[in-house]
Image: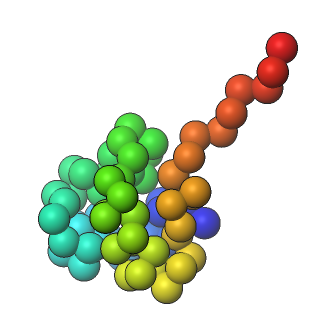
Amino acid sequence: MKLKQYLTEKNITPEAFAVLVGGVSESGVRKWMYGERVPRREQMIAIAEKTDGLVMPNDFLLPQEPAQ
């Protein structure tokens, strides 16, 4: 599940999630949500823990372009 989908479904604001995860700003969470940035390893672990495994590190991977 993508982070944006999780936060929307759980009615959690980026600001509240930033506090929950710790070590990141609201702006940082928004960048994760919109694919502008990828969380660091330790942040990905915290995200997976705080979302009960619904948002996992591979959910932050960008889709691959098909081979030509």
* Residue located at (34% from left, 74% from top): 46
Residue 16 appears in the rendering: no
* Residue located at (38% from left, 81% from top): 50
Image quadrant in which you'd find residue 11: bottom left
Q: Considering only vertical position in the picture, is 9 above or below 30?
A: below
Image quadrant in which you'd find residue 17: bottom left
User: On the rendered image, what quadrant is the N terminus found in?
Assistant: bottom right
Q: Position of residue 12 (x, y in %)?
A: 36, 76
User: On the rendered image, what quadrant is the C terminus found in?
Assistant: top right
- 47 and 27: which is toward the camera: 47
Q: Is residue 4 left or right of residue 36?
A: right
- 53 and 1: which is toward the camera: 53
* Residue located at (33% from left, 46% from top): 31
Residue 47 appears in the rendering: yes
Q: Position of residue 16 (x, y in %)?
A: 24, 74
Which residue is outermost to the bottom?
52
Q: Position of residue 65 (x, y in %)?
A: 71, 26
Colour style of the rendered protein structure: rainbow
Q: Considering only vertical position in the picture, is 14 above or below 48?
A: above
Q: Considering only vertical position in the picture, is 53 above or below 3?
A: below
Which residue is outermost to the front?
41
Which residue is outermost to the right?
68
* Residue located at (81% from left, 21% from top): 67
- 42 and 23: which is toward the camera: 42
Q: Position of residue 61 (x, y in %)?
A: 56, 46
